[in-house]
Amino acid sequence: MAETVIKTENLNFQYDSDNKTKQVLFDISLEIEKGSFVCILGRNGSGKSTLAKVFSLVNKPTSGTLELFGNQFDDKTTEDQEYEIRKKIGMVFQNPDNQMVATIVEEDVAFGPENLGLEPTEIRRRVDEALDIVGMKEFSKHSSSQLSGGQKQRVAIAGIIALSPEVIIFDESTAMLDPIGRREVMQTITKLAKMGKTIILITHHMDEAVNADRILILSNGRISADGTPKEIFSNDKLIEETGLELPQSKKILNMLSEKGIEIDTNGLDPHNAALNIAEALKKRRAQ
Amino acid sequence: MLKDITLGQYFPIDSPIHKIDPRMKLITAIVYIVSVFFARSAVAYGFMLLTAILLVIVSRIPIKTILKSLKPLIFIVVITGIINIFWYQPKDSSTLLVSFWIINIYLEGIISAVYMLTRIACIIIGTSVILTYTTSPIALTDGLEQMLAPLGKLHLPVHEFSMMMTIAMRFIPTIVEETDKIMAAQKARGSDFSTGNIIRRIKAIIPILIPLFVSSFRRADELAIAMECRCYRGGEGRTKMTKLKFKYYDFLWLVLVASLIAVMIVINTYLPFYIV
């Protein structure tokens, strides 16, 4: 069995502001294995971003246990311990503009490794490598204001890759992008997953979830489902209850099936859906 | 209008000026400004203008951009020009050109106004070519940080200061873009920024400033979290991707710029035309 990188048990979290408290996460128990590609789905306000911030120690759990790389973390965690974890767990946020520190692309990517206190030659190597992975090498000397949203977000991802973390959390990193930018970023994420990084993708776009190994659905601060994309998306009732939407391809297949066409509705991405439709057409002709 | 702001607009091209160490650029920018103030005769001013043009050519920055950067200054230039012409304190040797009512315009007044314009133009072109256009903001703040490093021993927050500068420069285009967006949104709701008296216009700016401030605070908050997640914990133990090192080329450049002062003195002494 693969090593567990993130483990929580009966984890609760609440925001304290003035004298009001608002509990956002209830009784979360989960384990995430090294090298897996996990997608956390949920509606707005379901607590998915809060959970991501707990994983990266921006938010500390109110009660319950949080175990990262075999070490327990709570509100007594020191800054040095946090720093050690942040070397291993990187986080990419929603707005690319608000996570870039420097004006020039390569200087921004270098920000992380510079914080680690690495040798200049090693920083240079990591920056070049990270920009190569996200396909932004030719833009290394550009200023960030000349880039598109998708390109900026890829630079932000490079900034995290340069820290060479084992786990990368994407907190709705595609939410503010146009369709082209979203595709670019998703391609980068899938590439990183194939490279063996542990990916935690937080999103409300169903189409992005179909490539994951595992899907967790969060609703009202509780885990309401946990399974492979196939299992999750074949449970239409569950999807409806949590206020989510099926991926487009799956929706089309379901609609065809409802019209009385004999078709395999297990096609989550456009490619598989197309194959299923072709299969159904063939069957019809044969009849 | 906002797009004309030139601060922090770096041109990533290759030129002899781009190669100079940022610390040396900071020093020479100051030396250049000093040398402009040494000019007294017409020849000296002409020579300074020539060096400014030479700098632009060597740096390969498009002339159009330079002229654009001078545009917002027209107002200041006109005001100082007028002040210089009308408030000139005449000496015995001054030539009176026009005189009506209480206003006297002297030839020397006009000359001193022209000198003032040349001086302002030289300073702006010189510093923007030596510094802002040819130095990446990070290199500039790195240079500043290293030059001020001795002050760190007095427990002054040198690293924090340079980090603030870096972030401020990084966010100039972002905030400008945002301001344009908010202005468009307020215009769509019927706001009017361009008519009415001054008080009305100032009042019209408030609905732009408030959303701008609110969103800037949110940005600052998000940026702080993102920086922490990228292992930032202040200047201690931090290294740099590019280490600054003086080359003999840098000193050559310093000598070149510093010799301008000498040239100015020589010209003032041997070609003292129209000194006012």
Image (cartoon, coloured by chain):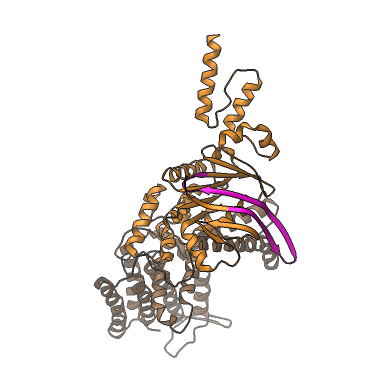
Chain colours: A orange, B brown
| Residue B225, placed above or below residue B245 | above
The structure residue drawn at horizontal position 37% and vertical position 49%, both measured from the top left corner, is: A132
| Residue B263, placed above or below residue A219 | below
Residue lying furthest top: A287
Magenta stretch: dominant secondary structure: strand
> Which quarter of the image is occupied by the C terminus of chain A?
top right
Look at the image and tell me whether residue B230 can be seen. Answer: no
- The answer to whether residue B34 is left or right of residue B189 is left
| Residue A35 covered by magenta stretch | yes
Residue A79: x %, y % from top left:
53, 68
Quarter of the image for residue B196 reads: bottom right
The structure residue drawn at horizontal position 52% and vertical position 78%, both measured from the top left corner, is: B83
Count the marks: how many? 0
Q: Give the extent of the magenta segment.
A: A8-37
The structure residue drawn at horizontal position 49% and vertical position 79%, both measured from the top left corner, is: B84
- The answer to whether residue A221 is left or right of residue B233 is right
Residue A109: x %, y % from top left:
42, 58
Residue A44: x %, y % from top left:
66, 47
Look at the image and tell me whether residue B225 can be seen. Answer: yes
Residue B19: x %, y % from top left:
31, 65
Quarter of the image for residue A63 reads: bottom right
Residue lying furthest front: A1
